[in-house]
């Protein structure tokens, strides 16, 4: 009896376990959440630029140290490989993304004159393009 209860409990646990790991649906996105996500994206891009700048400065310090060591020991200094200068990204400044214009405001549809008077006419094709039959 006890063995069958333990076995049933074990089977029930194995069957119910995948439901416990199911993903919950994402919460509905609000304007504040979208703004925060945009800020996080911009901050990550700025941090990558800052990391590149700091790496560039560290590489220049190491190259200067090696060059100074070669000069001090009297060895010939090889010519430096030309590299672009390090560019400082400056402080982080969040620029909120512009809201896209609705289709009505973007001028994507035809002008009002065309909509009021369509370009069609009552003339037949033969009247518009008179051609003699041969």
Image (tube, helix red, strand yellow):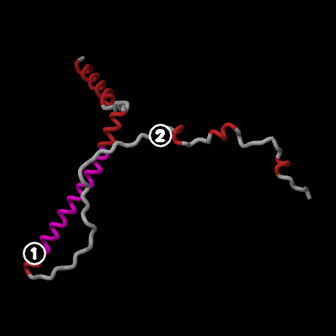
- In the picture, residue 35 is in which quadrant? top left
Q: Give the percent coordinates (x, y) of residue 73.
A: 7, 80
Q: Position of residue 38 (x, y in %)?
A: 33, 42
Residue found at x 14% / y 74%: 67
N-terminal of the pair, mark 2 or mark 1, is 1
Direction top: furthest residue: 1
Q: Nearer the viewer, mark 2 or mark 1?
A: 2
Q: State the count of labels.
A: 2
Q: Quadrant of residue 66?
A: bottom left
Q: Residue at x 24, y 17 (%)?
A: 1
Is residue 47 rendered magenta in the image?
A: yes
Q: Is residue 80 toward the left or the right of residue 30 in the image? A: left
Q: Is residue 3 above or below residue 96?
A: above
Q: CA distance from mark 2 to mark 1?
A: 61 Å
Which stretch is magenta? 40-67
Q: What residue is disc 1 on? A: 69
Q: Residues within 10 Å of mark 2 (few under 14, many from 20)?
A: few
Secondary element type, mark 2: loop
Question: In the image, what residue occupies the spot 66% across and 40% down?
Answer: 113
Image location (x, y in percent) of residue 14: 30, 29
Pointer 2: what residue? 101
Q: Secondary structure at mark 1?
A: helix
**Residue 102, position as x, y percentages in the image:** 49, 38
The residue under the point 56% across, 43% down is: 108
Q: Residues within 10 Å of mark 1 (few under 14, many from 20)?
A: few
């Amino acid at each position: 009896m006890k063995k069958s209860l333990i076995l049933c409990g074990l089977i029930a646990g194995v069957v119910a376990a995948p439901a416990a790991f199911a993903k919950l649906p994402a919460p509905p996105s609000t304007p504040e959440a979208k703004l925060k996500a945009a800020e996080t994206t911009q901050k990550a891009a700025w941090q990558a630029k800052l990391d590149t700048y700091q790496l560039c400065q560290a590489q220049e310090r190491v190259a200067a140290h090696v060059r100074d060591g070669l000069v001090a020991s009297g060895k010939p200094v090889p010519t430096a490989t030309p590299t672009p200068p390090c560019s400082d990204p400056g402080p982080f400044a969040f620029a909120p993304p512009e809201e896209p214009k609705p289709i009505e405001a973007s001028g994507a549809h035809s002008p009002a004159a065309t909509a009021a008077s369509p370009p069609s006419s009552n003339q037949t094709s033969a009247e518009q393009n008179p051609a003699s039959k041969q």
